[in-house]
Amino acid sequence: MKLTRPPAFARPNGATRPGATASRISLAALAFVTLSACEQNSFVPPPPPKVDVGVPIQRNVMRYLEATGNTSAIKSVDLVARVQGVLQTINYQDGGFVKEGTTLFTIEPDTYKLKLDQAQAAEAGAQASLKQTEADYKRQVDLVARQAVSQATLDTSTSARDNAQANLQQAQANTKIAAVNYGYTNVVAPFDGIVSAHLVSVGELVGAASPTQLATIVQLDPIYVNFNVNEQDVLRIRAEARRRGMTSSQLTQLPIEVGLQTESGYPHQGKLDYAAPTINQSTGTLAVRGVLPNPDRVLLPGYYVRVRVPFDQQQDALLVPDVALGSDQSGRYVLVVNGDNVVEQRKVVTGPIDGELRVIDSGLKADDRVVIAGLLRAIPGQKVDPQLQKVESSPASAK
């Protein structure tokens, strides 16, 4: 019979080696320690996001009435031929600037000069006739006083004198008419301005049936700006004027600022000079006009312009960067970090913009910390890590 050796780890009667037992105990202890370590490694949330916050700027701000309007010429006149004749000369360049009194067109002056000479000659004859009848009248008065002639003779002399006086007056009127017509042969500029292209040519008969338009002259300096103010603004301005004790005449002397659509800001300054006496019932607006100096002729009649009129200075207004404001269906809002560093959405009423800052009329306090950068990381109701920054006119853009 062949005897076989049992395995090294086996023992008779099911016994095990002492070393195997110790090895199992070590494995169990290691597993316990590992499991305990896994139970202690819990989830750690990330830190709150960093956002830039700033306290609103507090300063005095000028309040403006803003509108849109159109420019128009203070004077615009059609130059017409007021006498009939052949156009002889055109004495200006189309689109050129001319001074008041400059001769622009000449219309056949010789004919009207002869008519003037004729009227002056007739006036001289009437003066001579009056002189003669005056002398005869004086003689007849003297003779009647000495009873040398009858009263009828004096009456005839008196009638002749009165008729001569009337003839002289008629001759004098004819002379004036002839002089006026002769003056119309030279069409002159009634004021300083720009003259449009001529509408007739040299050699053309003008003024035949009715006055013929020759050109148009437009004054560009100064220039009008016309705009409309809605009824609510009118009420607000009038209330402010009463508070400040301003009269209606002072109100129409308020300064006005104008800017073209291609210009930044309002580089053109002038003053109000007219406000309509009544509100237009169909539009609910008041027609207002301003006048501006325009020496360089930058503004042309018909331009569409932006207009603002300063009417009140707000004391200690609160301003925040305009980029810090958001909007939704309920209006404008800002994000504010409270004392627990939790973001809150605050509804605000906004005023005018001042550079890159926006005036906040209500809804914000002077010590509120407004989120000015990192707006996408600031979620209402969640904590943030606020980084206090100084609010300036040109804040960093919201990220």
Image (cartoon, grey):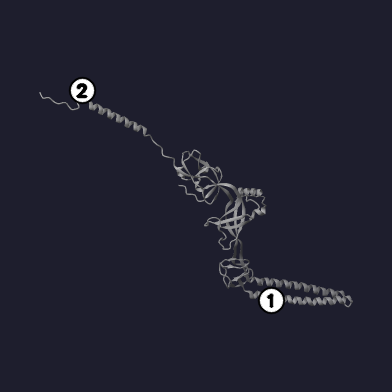
Instruction: Tell me the residue at 78%/75% (across/down).
Output: 130
Q: Quadrant of the N terminus?
A: top left
Q: Position of residue 399 (x, y in %)?
A: 45, 47
Left or right of 130 on screen, residue 319:
left
Q: Position of residue 36 (x, y in %)?
A: 34, 31
Q: Position of residue 231 (x, y in %)?
A: 61, 48
Instruction: Measure the C-alpha gap from mark 2 to mark 1.
Output: 162 Å
Instruction: Tell me the residue at 63%/71% (across/down).
Output: 186
Local crowd size for mark 2, using a 10 Å CA cut-off: few (<14), some (14–19), many (≥20) = few
169 over 271 or under it: above or below: below
- Front residue (pair 330, 347): 347
Local crowd size for mark 1, using a 10 Å CA cut-off: few (<14), some (14–19), many (≥20) = some
- Front residue (pair 9, 1): 9
Amino acid type at mark 2: Gly
- Front residue (pair 60, 203): 60
Instruction: Tell me the residue at 65%/75% (across/down).
Output: 111
Q: Which residue is mark 1?
A: 117
34 over 120 or under it: above or below: above
343 over 392 or under it: above or below: above
Q: Secondary structure at mark 1?
A: helix
Left or right of 112 on screen, residue 386:
left
State yes or no: discs 2 and 1 in contact (Cβ < 8 Å): no
As drawn, the residue found furthest toward the top would be 13
As drawn, the residue found furthest toward the left would be 1
Q: Position of residue 101 (x, y in %)?
A: 63, 69
Q: Which residue is mark 2?
A: 14
Amino acid type at mark 1: Asp
Instruction: Tell me the residue at 30%/29% (across/down).
Output: 29
Q: Secondary structure at mark 2?
A: helix
- Front residue (pair 95, 397): 397
Using the rendered view, name the quadrant where residue 117 is placed.
Answer: bottom right
